[in-house]
């Protein structure tokens, strides 16, 4: 299911979600202070393009990751989360799209708390 799931995901949802994470990473990387946040965006963009076969682990947050998450939510997290939720709802309307819709909901959670997470 991994290879076929990634291919179908990329066609129906992954391209746009990965592109939005890449755009957020580019915008954050324009400033020197935002480069660490931009690097995390690029890591999550890779996950957004091909998520099947990978796991996301939410670890304990440090003070720095908490500050980064707060800045992230205010500036970029809410639009990415809303887009992922909307895409998830559209995919869950069909029975075949339910696994992909659930994956979109995982990305919505990740869009609100990207720092302090690990991708395996």
Image (tube, rainbow, N blue to C red):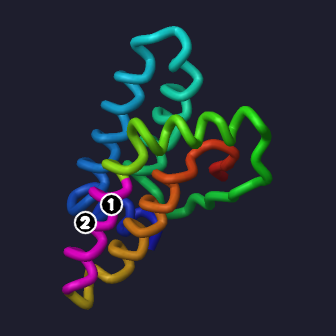
Task: Please give the range of residues in magenta.
Answer: 81-93
> In the rendered view, does 74 fall on the left or right side of 117?
left
Q: In this view, does 101 lie above or below 43?
A: below
Which residue lies at the image location 22% right of the left edge and 58% below the top edge?
A: 11
- Horizontal side of residue 91 vs 76, given as left or right: left
Residue, x 26% and y 85% (percent of image)?
96
Where is residue 106? Give x, y as percent.
48, 66
- The answer to whether residue 33 is above or below residue 11 is above
How far from the left and from the top, in percent, is residue 86? 25, 66
Residue under the image location 62 percent in, 58 percent down: 56
Viewed as shown, does residue 89 lie left or right of 56?
left
Main SS category, magenta section: helix
Magenta run includes residue 86 = yes
Q: How crowded is mark 2: few (under 14 residues within 10 Å), some or many (20 or more)?
A: many
Is disc 2 placed on a helix, strand or loop? helix
Is residue 73 placed above or below 14 in the rendered structure? above
> Which residue in the rendered view is the most extreme toward the top?
32
Give the mark count: 2
The residue beneath circle 1 is 84
Q: Is residue 89 left or right of residue 25?
A: left
Q: How crowded is mark 1: few (under 14 residues within 10 Å), some or many (20 or more)?
A: many
SS label for mark 1: helix
Q: Is residue 53 magenta?
A: no
Q: Which of 18 and 4 is in front in this view?
A: 18
Q: In which quarter of the image is the N terminus?
A: bottom left
**Residue occupying image coordinates x 66% and y 49%:** 117
- Give yes or no for contact between labels 2 and 1 (Cβ–Cβ under 8 Å): yes
**Can you give x and y, in whole percent of width and height, for residue 52 in the image?**
48, 63
Q: Distance between the residues labelled 2 and 1?
A: 5 Å
Q: Name the residue under label 2.
A: 87
Q: Against 76, is 101 above or below?
A: below
């Amino acid at each position: 299911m991994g290879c076929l799931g990634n291919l179908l995901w990329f066609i129906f949802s992954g391209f746009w979600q990965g592109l939005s994470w890449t755009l957020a990473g580019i915008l954050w990387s324009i400033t020197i202070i935002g480069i660490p946040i931009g690097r995390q965006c690029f890591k999550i963009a890779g996950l957004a393009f091909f998520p099947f076969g990978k796991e996301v682990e939410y670890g304990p947050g440090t003070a720095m990751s908490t500050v980064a998450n707060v800045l992230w939510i205010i500036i970029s997290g809410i639009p990415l989360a809303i887009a992922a939720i909307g895409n998830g709802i559209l995919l869950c309307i069909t029975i075949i799209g339910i696994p992909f819709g659930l994956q979109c909901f995982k990305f919505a959670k990740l869009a609100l708390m990207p720092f302090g997470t690990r991708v395996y």
